[in-house]
Amino acid sequence: MKGEVEGYLTRRAELALPKNLFASQRESFSWNRLMMLLDLRSVSTWRAGSLSVLLFSGCHAEVPARHETVQRTTTVAQSQAVEVNEPPFERESDFRLLPRDQFDAFGAEEQTWTETQEGFACSGKPKGYLYSKQPYQDFTLRLDYRFPRPETLKDESKFKGNTGFLIYVTGEHKLWPTCLEVQGKFLQMAAIKENGGAAPVKVDDDQQARQKARKPVGEWNSLEIQSQAGAVQVLLNGTLISKSEPDFLSAGLIGIQAEDHPFEVRRLRIRSESPPVVAP
């Protein structure tokens, strides 16, 4: 086996080193010298029948370090495993789905919003938002969403993924419209804030509960937004995170922001708890 490895390393050295240098020193290269020149950090072998397979990791500018490859593979595998092991989705009998065709778009290009099997994906650019064709007042809105996980992300506290879920959208369409926003931003997930010149809203927010309930970047997080006579409660993965007191906004369109970062939404559904309201 060592002979096979030496042969492979010799061919690698012929490609990696200047031809005149290699030619003049070919005979003097020892096994250890080849290892040093190629900075080979690990060599793994296994046999399948009579077939020997060599895995080389760590050659600069060509193959990523072994620990990085394993880390990325593990992340992808874990994400796929989570999705595969999910129970089948069953819509609650008193909820109805809100597919893409129930929304119009403001500030969007053709590729900004695309339909997926269970919802839609957003490129994040340009900035804008979807808004429902129908206004709502008292309702419960449920959805799952996720940001793609960058391969280079190590510290989630620095992840800048951002979107927002708008309620009570009123007045003219602009960046950003008058409304309340339930934050989709990863670091502020499920917070409540005012937008577009709306009066400041009084909010109780539990940061500790947010950190415990929030799932990692790349995984689906579930939001539940409850609206009752202008009072709002937001649950993240079943945990109450924030609630606001009634203000002058209590009815309007529902929106989803495109805010520079790609993300996906699935299983968007609503239970309306009041008669349809007149469009603002």
Image (spheres, rainbow, N blue to C red):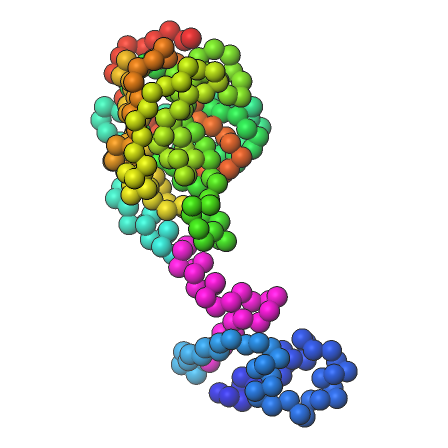
In the displayed orientation, state which residue is furthest to the right: 20
Image quadrant where one finds the C terminus: top left
* Residue range (magenta): 52-76
In which quadrant of the rendered view does residue 44 lie?
bottom left
Q: Is residue 203 left or right of residue 19?
A: left
**Residue lying at 60% horizontally and 84% vertically, measured from the top left:** 34
Task: Say if the magenta span includes residue 65.
Answer: yes
In the displayed orientation, state which residue is furthest to the top: 278
Q: Is residue 263 left or right of residue 96?
A: right
**Residue lying at 55% horizontally and 26% vertically, measured from the top left:** 108
Rendered location of residue 117, percent (x, y): 40, 37
Vertical placement of residue 136 versus 260, above or below: above
In the displayed orientation, state which residue is furthest to the left: 93
Q: Nearer the viewer, residue 170 or 55?
A: 170
Rendered location of residue 144, percent (x, y): 35, 36
Rendered location of residue 156, percent (x, y): 42, 47
Q: Nearer the viewer, residue 89 or 171?
A: 171
**Residue lying at 50% horizontally and 21% vertically, measured from the top left:** 176
**Residue lying at 77% horizontally and 82% vertically, measured from the top left:** 20
State whether residue 97 appears in this view. no
Vertical placement of residue 27 versus 227, above or below: below
Label count reads 0
State whether residue 193 appears in this view. yes
Q: Nearer the viewer, residue 203 or 66?
A: 203
Task: Say if the magenta span includes residue 35.
Answer: no
Rendered location of residue 155, percent (x, y): 44, 51
